[in-house]
Image: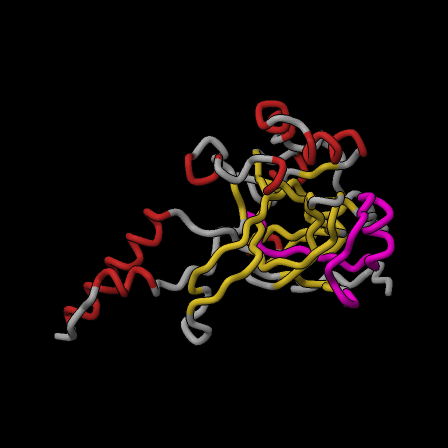
Amino acid sequence: MCNLYSITTNQAAIIALFRVINRYVGNLAPMPGVFPDYKAPIVRNGPGGRELATARWGMPSSSKALMDATKKRAEKLQAKGKPVDFNELLRMEPDGGTTNIRNVKSKHWTRWLGVENRCLVPFNSFSEFNKAEGGDVWFALDETRPLACFAGIWTNWTSVRKVKEGETTNDLYAFLTTEPNAEVGAIHPKTMPVILTTPVEVETWMTAPPDEVLKLQRPLSDGSLKIVARGVKEDPVGQTT
């Protein structure tokens, strides 16, 4: 599971590579470490063309996941002799979101597979954690960390992300995952992000019918990624402003 990546390329390069027409962001500071629930740049389809915007990392979790979490919280409160309004508890259950999406055939995710909810998630490098290998192991297309993107989805959603924030409305995103290629599999044998590396793949993801775009949910070919850093929570190398 990928829960850490970097995006240090400036927005002018993002706009140029992904043919952005409109932007709804101010200055984008380099982000050598993007963690779950951080606000980071995405490129999405808009009425006038592609838009560069920011969103919080973590799509809405499934109703089952929230129900299970609420039941556990209710049981703890009841064990302490406190009254429980289950419906209100469920409404206010904090949901930090789901960062990685594998089972795209789930009804929970199919509603967001239309072109209006697809997005590109720009990145320079991403990390997979392996304690035996020194912690976070960072991968990129090569040592220069060229700009690329994950295949993502986004939505506007009202929920409780954090208890201290209460109920808020936010643009949220996550990206698809798949089985790992050789390089990632040696560190994390279960998954890797779905990475788009060519203009054709980017165009397909942003415009094609769902049945066609899901063919992109596949690992990169073996040898396509390089390990560029180990044991650090940020990867600022190649940072540009």
Q: Which residues are magenta?
A: 1-28
**Image quarter of residue 166:** bottom left
2 displayed left or right of 79: right
Q: Residue at x 69, y 46 (%)?
A: 46
Q: Residue at x 80, y 44 (%)?
A: 18
Residue 4 inside the magenta-drawn segment: yes
Q: Residue at x 60, y 61 (%)?
A: 35
Q: Is residue 26 above or below residue 198?
A: below
Q: Is residue 215 above or below residue 206?
A: above
Q: Is residue 182 above or below residue 240?
A: above
Observer-nearest residue: 82 or 49? 49
Residue 219 inside the magenta-drawn segment: no
Can residue 230 be seen here? The reply is: no
Numbered disc total: 0
Give the image location of residue 96, x and y in percent.
46, 60
Q: Residue furthest left?
A: 81
Q: Residue at x 73, y 59 (%)?
A: 24
